[in-house]
Image (cartoon, rainbow, N blue to C red):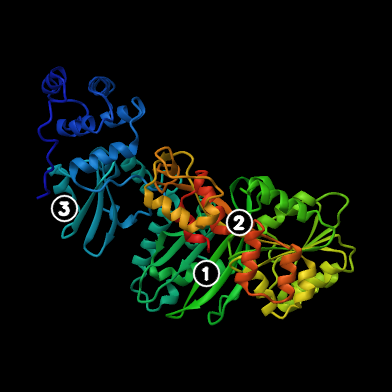
Amino acid sequence: MIAQAAGPQNKREVLSVATVKRLQVNKRPRKKPMERSLLDYILYRGLVSTDALDAAMEESLAREVDLETVLIDTYRVPKPALGSALSEFYQYPYLPYDERTIIDPELFRNLSFDYLRKNSWVPLKRQGSMLDIVTNDPRDVEKDLDMRRAFPGATIRFSVGLRRDIEQYLLVAAGQASGGSITKILGELVDEVGSERNAETERREIDENDSAIVRLANQIIAEAYRLEASDVHIEPYSDRKETAVRFRVDGTCFTYMRIPATYRRAIVSRLKIMANLDIAERRKPQDGKIRHKLAKDREIELRVATLPTAGNNEDVVLRLLTAKETMSLEAMDFPSGVLRTVKELSEQPHGIFLCVGPTGSGKTTMLHAVMKHINTDERKIWTAEDPIEVTQEGLRQVQVHPKIGFTFASAMRAFLRADPDVIMIGEMRDKETADTAIEASLTGHLVMSTLHTNSAVETVTRLLDMGCDAFNFADAMLGILAMRLCKRICSHCKEEYHPSKQEYDELVQGYGTRQWETLGVAYSEDMRLYRGKGCEVCNQTGFKGRVGLHELLVGTEEIKCRIQSRARTTEILSVAMRDGMVTLLQDGIQKVLKGLTTYRQVRAVAVK
């Protein structure tokens, strides 16, 4: 028997006499009102006043709608707050609607959607004998009996939800909402798997040209684009386990859906066909590209990489290269001093400027923003990229093809014969490319490129370790910009709070005690930091979008002398900070104080 939760004890009667009489008189209301003790919880938590609740109940009975709808729509009670009251009253976790939830279609084979809508409950997931069900009233005995009749032998794990969220889950499950197409496709796959279980070989079950597989691959890409994912990971497993599909959104991975194990090779083969890869070769990595046309004449490009994994499987990673407008330097969250210096360096007639950081840190976006700043009729700009992610009028952009010997180094040598003013190289992957870039920057050309290193100062050591000449690089270097992207606080649910002394001390320690004094930020009762409460816009995470962190090492005369003498990284860093360089961590802490992000997010991506 489900445990009963008690209402607030020793509290004054919160419902008016008129309300109680009205509930007693109306013995057969058209819509079942919320229980009185639950209303006590709503009043006790201060969500509405007693008078407002009385009026809401009158409106609910008059309009023949549930009280929840009136409270949310008319009296603007926040859904999370009402859900929290439900959770506290029923003593079960509150589960809001999440568009990323994929509902198992098999759970609805013996259920009527009309019945589920009328009784406000929905089965979401089954793992072994454990069944997850969301309902607006876990205490309803009749519902409980119906659930156990529909799923005999199952151990039911309840969550409470609002009626409108349960209705949305049912719309998706029925294929009537935008996200329902994937659920319908999965339902078709489940049906096919069930009908083919008696087949003698797995090959008869798997066909990358099956209509459901084709539509599923297309829909995965469309959903990734809709959710603004940067990467899609297809992860098959052995032993008949389901294939996981994970999206990376704002730098964080999450499981978006699972595909029946029987189709693990079919979905991989379909994506390889779309990328013009060899579907018969599963023993070595392959890479390619997909040009995918979405609705409304929107076309996106995806970079595809396959990797052989355990159990004779293949993982596929798709990177979405959406052809967006080129960002401006002003929109990239630079401190004013760094922005001014970057513009000055990009306007120099010759030299080398590097943008460094890990994969997905915004290096290419940054270089195209610099190109946009200097892209005028007076300058001839050549770029060598792999792939060409952002197009920009005025640039002559070249796609390199390493498989046929057209590498970054060979592209740069060709550029030098094509009268360039500015050359951009997508990445300096080897000594040959780096040497060619340095030589070009010493002969009257402005060269820009990217490199995979942790910080601006470490880039110097990396290039010298690659075998580049210290004197040539020191003469050519204009600046090195290190970048990171960390999560931005959601602007819709952003709130301020007073930090504890411990939080303040962590900021001081991370920034450096001596440098912190220059900020002039002392701990006091008036000090405020910011965080996200969580809302529907940010999927209750408190974060939406990303903010850039920057560290700029300028090639001053003293820095160049240290490079020529092959000084240690710590020595170069000490000189740079003395000259005013702000590290990635320090820039992140400044953005914490401005309310753009949190210290925890900064520490997750920045190095000290």
Instruction: Name the residue beneath numbered marker 1.
Output: 316
Q: Position of residue 209 (x, y in %)?
A: 53, 66
Q: Nearer the viewer, residue 281 or 108?
A: 281
Q: Nearer the viewer, residue 207 or 301?
A: 301
Instruction: Give the Cα separation between the discs numbered 2 and 1.
Output: 38 Å
Q: In the image, is 182 to the left or to the right of 166?
A: right
What amino acid type should be assigned to the residue bearing mark 2? Val
Q: Position of residue 61 (x, y in %)?
A: 23, 22
Instruction: Give the Cα separation between the discs numbered 3 and 1.
Output: 40 Å
Q: Secondary structure at mark 3?
A: helix
Q: Residues within 10 Å of mark 3 (few under 14, many from 20)?
A: few
Residue 327 at least partly seen: no
The mark that comes first in sequence, 3 or 1, is 3
Identify the residue shown where x is 54% and y is 49%: 590
Depth check, mark 3 against mark 1: the one in front is: 1
In this picture, is 442 found above or below 48?
below
Q: Residue furthest top?
A: 18
Instruction: Give the Cα separation between the discs numbered 2 and 3.
Output: 62 Å
Q: Secondary structure at mark 2?
A: loop
Q: Position of residue 474 (x, y in %)?
A: 76, 70
Q: Secondary structure at mark 1?
A: strand
Instruction: Name the residue beneath numbered marker 2.
Output: 582
Instruction: Name the residue beneath numbered marker 3.
Output: 148
Depth check, mark 2 against mark 1: the one in front is: 2
The mark that comes first in sequence, 2 or 1, is 1
Residue 538 at least partly seen: yes
Depth check, mark 2 against mark 3: the one in front is: 2
What amino acid type should be assigned to the residue bearing mark 1? Val
In this picture, is 435 found above or below 245?
below
Whether pointer 3 and pointer 1 mark residues with C-beta atoms closer than 8 Å, the reply is no
Q: In the image, is 212 to the left or to the right of 41?
A: right
Whether pointer 2 and pointer 3 mark residues with C-beta atoms closer than 8 Å, the reply is no
